[in-house]
Amino acid sequence: MTPSSAPIVVMHDPRLNDPEQELVRTSDLTPGELESVLEVLEAMRRWREAERENNEASQRYMRLGASDMRALRVLIAAGNQKLPMTPSAMAGHLGISSASTTKLLDRLERGGHVVRRAHPDDRRSLVIEVTEETRRAARATVGREHARRFDVIAELTPEQRRTVADFFGAMAATAERDAV
C-alpha cells in the first residue's frame, strides 16, 4: 500500500474508537457539542504535529538531538537572565544524571554550541554558556517561532487568554494524573 492509498485513521473520535463509551462518555452531549469537542481535539492534534515538525526542523538545522535542544533552551534562558548555569544546575533542570550531563555538555562543546568557563563567584565550579553563533541560530529558528506564538496570544482578549490558560492548565493536570 502506497502512502497515498493508506487508509485514513481517525484518532480522536470516540464514536469510532470507543463506541461502547467505556472511556469517553459522549451520550450527554448533543451532536453539535460533540462536533465542537472533536474540533478542539483536531486543532490540538494539528498544533502538536506542527510543533513536532518545527522541533525536528530546528534539530536538523542545528544538527542536534532533542535533549541537546532542551539544554540549549535552558542555557539561553539562563544567559538572558544573567544566571550562571553550572553542570549540576543543568542536570537538575533537565532531570538527568551528572554523568549524562557531562556527556551532553561534551557533545555540545565539540559541536561548538557551548563553552565552559570558570564560575564568576566560585572558582571550584564551572558555568556553561551558549556560543554567540548558536544563540543567533536559535534566535532565528526557535526564537522566531516563540515570538509568533506570543503575538497570537497577545491578540486574544484578556478573557480569552484566561480561558486558554485554564484549558491548558486542566489539560496538563490530566497528563500529570496519568503519569502516576
Image (tube, rainbow, N blue to C red):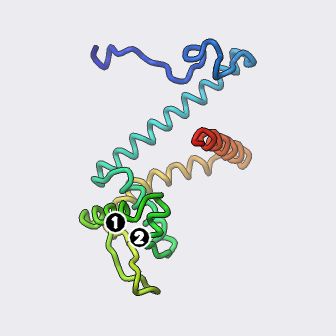
Please state, as top left, top right, bottom left or bottom right, where the N terminus lies in the image: top left
Which residue occupies the foreground of this view, 121 or 129?
121
SS label for mark 1: helix
Q: Look at mark 1 in the image and give the residue it sits on.
A: 102
In which image quadrant can residue 97 be found? bottom left
Residue at 57 percent of width and 47 percent of height: 152
Q: Is the C terminus in the top left, top right, bottom left or bottom right quadrant?
A: top right
Look at mark 2 in the image and give the residue it sits on: 87
**Rendered residue at 42%/41% (across/down):** 52
Q: Image check: 46 left or right of 56?
A: right
Q: Please determine whether, in this image, residue 57 is positioned above or below residue 132.
A: above
Q: Secondary structure at mark 2?
A: helix
- Mark 2, other Cα within 10 Å: few <14 / some 14–19 / many ≥20: some
Where residue 141 appears, x then y in whole percent? 38, 53
Percent of width and height locating residue 158: 72, 49
- At horizontal 45% and vertical 70% (from top left) the residue drawn is 88
CB of mark 2 within 8 Å of CB of mark 1? yes
Q: Position of residue 73 (x, y in %)?
A: 44, 60
Few, some or many residues within 10 Å of mark 1 (<14, 14–19, 20+): some
Which circle marks residue 88 in the picture?
Answer: none
Q: Earlier in the sequence, mark 2 or mark 1?
A: 2
Q: What residue type is disc 2 on?
A: Pro
How far apart marks 2 and 1 lie (CA) works out to 7 Å
In this view, 158 is above or below 91 = above
Q: Quadrant of residue 105?
A: bottom left
Which residue is found at the position 45% from the left and 85% from the top? 122
Amino acid at pointer 1: Thr
In the rendered image, the residue lying farthest to the left is 110
